[in-house]
Image: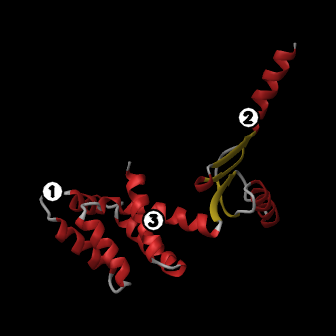
Amino acid sequence: MEELIAKRYVNALISATDKNQRAEFSKILLEMTEAFADATVVEKLSSPLIANEAKTAMVVESLGNTDSKLVNFIKIIGENGRLDLLPTISKVLKQAIQKETNQYEGIVTTSTKLKSKELKELQKSLATYTNGANVNLVQEVSDINGIKVSVEDLGIEVNFSKQRVKEQLIDFITKSL
């Protein structure tokens, strides 16, 4: 439900801004979203004891000197009592920008660090699989015994585990006998 409401706000923001403004607003909203990790901020924004105008003023003050369109956007969200949707709006705006530019971010999780050539080959394979989408992969080292590729905004998650291949091979052999 939250994402549906957030999409309406994002669509309005997209129709009122150009590409550069959207990128700047997305950056500001993503930074603002980090503040929502603090329990006191969430408590103040969801408190029925604080008026919507005061909540909106608090959020607008945190923006500092910024574009008047973004300030007005935040004021409209505040007037409608939807300030708690800012993290969701930020996420949906980021997804819309990625779709518009056809550039996505993904995560590769392995037990050892991949070479840059291997990472580029993986990105090239993903581009072919996703009809030309430019996927920038960030590498994470973990204790998994295999490789996992995840591009959340495209709905891609691929996992190759040595343990899983071993189990499937044993299962195949036992079924064959």
| Label of residue 163 in the image | 2
Of the pair 60 and 165, the residue shown nearer to us: 60
Q: Nearer the viewer, mark 2 or mark 1?
A: 1
Q: In the picture, residue 127 is in which quadrant?
A: bottom right
Residue 58 in picture, x, y percent from top left:
23, 73
**Amino acid on which disc 1 is placed:** Pro
Q: Looking at the image, is 153 positioned above or below residue 70?
A: above
Q: Nearer the viewer, mark 1 or mark 3?
A: 3
| Residue at the right extreme, as displayed | 177
Say if residue 130 shows up in the picture: yes
Q: What colouring method underlies this structural image?
A: secondary structure
At label 3, counting other C-alpha atoms closer than 10 Å, the crowd grade (few under 14, some 14-19, many 20 or more) is few
**Which residue is at 42% across, 71% downward?**
13
Say what secondary structure mark 1 lies in. loop
Of the pair 99 and 175, the residue shown nearer to us: 99
Q: Report which residue position mark 1 lands on.
A: 48
**Which residue is at 87% across, 16% downward?**
176
Q: Report which residue position mark 3 lands on.
A: 11
Residue 125 in picture, x, y percent from top left:
79, 57
Mark 1 or mark 3, earlier in chain: 3
**Amino acid on which disc 3 is placed:** Asn
